[in-house]
Amino acid sequence: MNGPKACVIGWPVRQSRSPLIHRYWLRLYGVEGSYELAEVEPDAFEAFVRSFAAQGFVGGNVTVPHKEAAYALLDAAEPAAVELKAANTLWLDNGALKGTNTDGFGFLANLDDAAPGWEGRRRLAVVLGAGGASRAVVAALAGRGFARVAVVNRTASRAFEVARLAGRAGEPYGPDDLPELLAETGLLVNATSLGMTGKPPLKIDLAPLSRSAVVTDLVYAPLETDLLAAARARGNAVVDGLGMLLHQAAPGFERWFGVRPEVTPELRSILIDNLLGR
Ligand code: NAP
């Protein structure tokens, strides 16, 4: 295969759906190029990235557990990566390694696409969880001008640390504070791994939540989580997490292959088929 070559680097990486997304766009736009899986152990990560050019790569995505290590190797980082001290998208520019973090962009683009007007009056967003995904979401919501971004997490120290990413808007909470917060929530985000296939359920009583609140889940397997099903049943607008995965991929594709790709309904249905093992 000729043309630019990109990859997704992870450990493990076989579960990554990035090749499905990028290969779809390569076909759709008739771009001569390729996108590969690169399973790279943490000890070998730096050497792998430093040899991008020698291997013929123009760049790549970075997934767990390499995002912080990728950030540390950058010659130049875009603000989204600097904010999170983690990079998920890398590219070579005249020999310099550049990088950004597109998770926050993907999160916002998914909501903009699936639930226009989701921001409401931008008063209170409640984010459950304080892991890597939550960091990107919390920073993105503060960037969109939410007056309050509440981070609710089992481990208090991580809630504090992540809430700081929202600056003055950030507020750390524990699970016991949730009922009171829900009464004022405009956007509820599940950024824990709870509710994912194979993980424990996310147990929340949505009774205090206003019917006008938008509810979104970063978990996309299953596509309709119990949280989304319960919210939909009581009349809340809901947005699943698959769109975030699709939208976060677009900026990298544009960097490497020169075309700004679209998240099409056909791409979404390809991913859904894959998730369902069809
Ligand atoms: P992570 O760094 O491992 O963080 C997991 C979070 O879940 C932590 O806040 C953890 O709380 C909480 N948690 C886990 N088990 C718990 C339990 N039994 N009770 C209470 N809290 C629990 O994971 P991540 O990388 O942020 O990913 C989180 C989820 O988002 C995953 O399901 C992932 O697949 C999904 N995700 C989706 C996208 C997308 O594009 N849609 C992108 C990124 C991630 P503690 O801090 O207390 O341990």
Image (cartoon, rainbow, N blue to C red):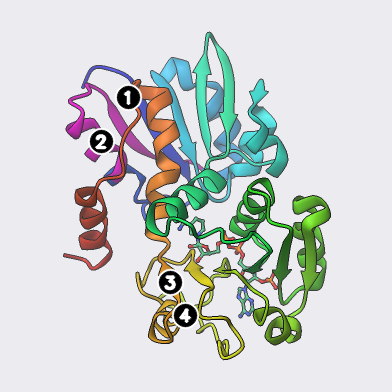
Q: Which residue is at 58% across, 23% downward? A: 98
Dot 3, how many residues are within 10 Å of its Cα: few (below 14), some (14-19), or many (20+)? some
Which residue, given by chain and number where applicable, does mark 2 sit on?
Answer: 25
Label disc, if present, on residue 237 of the rendered structure:
3
Mark 4 C-beta to ligand 1 under 8 Å = no
- Give the secondary structure at mark 3: strand
- Give the secondary structure at mark 4: helix
Q: In front: mark 4 or mark 3?
A: 3
Residue 140 vertical position relative to residue 186 in the rendered view, above or below: above
Which amino acid, mark 3? Answer: Ala
Please say if the residues under marks 2 and 3 sit with CB atoms less than 8 Å apart: no
Q: Which residue is at 38% across, 18% downward? A: 56
Please tell me which of labels 1 and 4 falls first in the chain.
4
Which amino acid, mark 1? Answer: Val
- CA–CA distance between discs 1 and 3? 32 Å
Compare residues 226 and 274 and report the one nearer the observer.
Answer: 226
Label disc, if present, on residue 259 of the rendered structure:
1
Label disc, if present, on residue 235 of the rendered structure:
none
Which residue, given by chain and number where applicable, does mark 4 sit on?
Answer: 227
Q: In front: mark 1 or mark 3?
A: 3
- CA–CA distance between discs 1 and 2? 9 Å
Location of the C terminus (image quadrant) = bottom left
Please say if the residues under marks 1 and 4 sit with CB atoms less than 8 Å apart: no
Dot 4, how many residues are within 10 Å of its Cα: few (below 14), some (14-19), or many (20+)? many
Please tell me which of labels 1 and 2 falls first in the chain.
2
- CA–CA distance between discs 1 and 4? 36 Å
Magenta residues, start to end: 21-40
Residue 230 visible within the image: yes
